[in-house]
Amino acid sequence: MPKILLVEDNEMNRDMLSRRLERKGYEIVIAIDGEQGVAMAQSERPALILMDMSLPVIDGWEATRRIRALPTFSDVPVIALTAHAMAGDQEKCVAAGCDDYDTKPVDLPRLLAKIEALLLRESAA
């Protein structure tokens, strides 16, 4: 069962997404801000990270950059989750080190397809 780190400050979003992903067979660990997300990435060693970009303490862009700077995390897939759907936001997320980007509110089938594709890519590597 792949472990996913969900970094999300909104309690309703955390609850909804974690329950739906657990029902799909994923183990979910949760961080509520960017700083905690970086620490939990190191302690929990997830197979994939779902990163909200608008976080307290440090934002998702900085948290992703810090995670990418860790020697053993250069290949852990990160999917940005954001309500920002303006032109250039996807490019900004990719520039910070995210592998993919998904908008809120989350479309679960679309997000699951992205998660499965990235996990498959990692297992093939």
Image (cartoon, grey):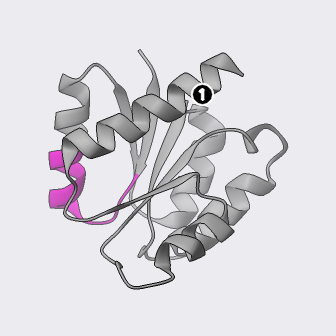
- Where residue 7 appears, x then y in whole percent? 42, 55
The C terminus - image quarter: top right
Q: Residue at x 52, y 37 (%)?
A: 48
Query: Which residues are the magenta region?
Result: 7-17
Q: Amino acid at mark 1?
A: Arg
Q: Which residue is mark 1?
A: 121
- Where residue 92 appears, x then y in whole percent? 58, 76
Circle 1 crowding by C-alpha within 10 Å: few under 14, some 14–19, many from 20: few
Say left or right for 76 vs 80.
right
Give above or below for 93 relative to 73: below
Our reading of the magenta stretch's main secondary structure is helix
Q: Secondary structure at mark 1?
A: helix
Say left or right for 114 vs 100.
left
Q: Residue at x 58, y 42 (%)?
A: 77
The N terminus - image quarter: top left
- The quadrant in which residue 108 appears is top left
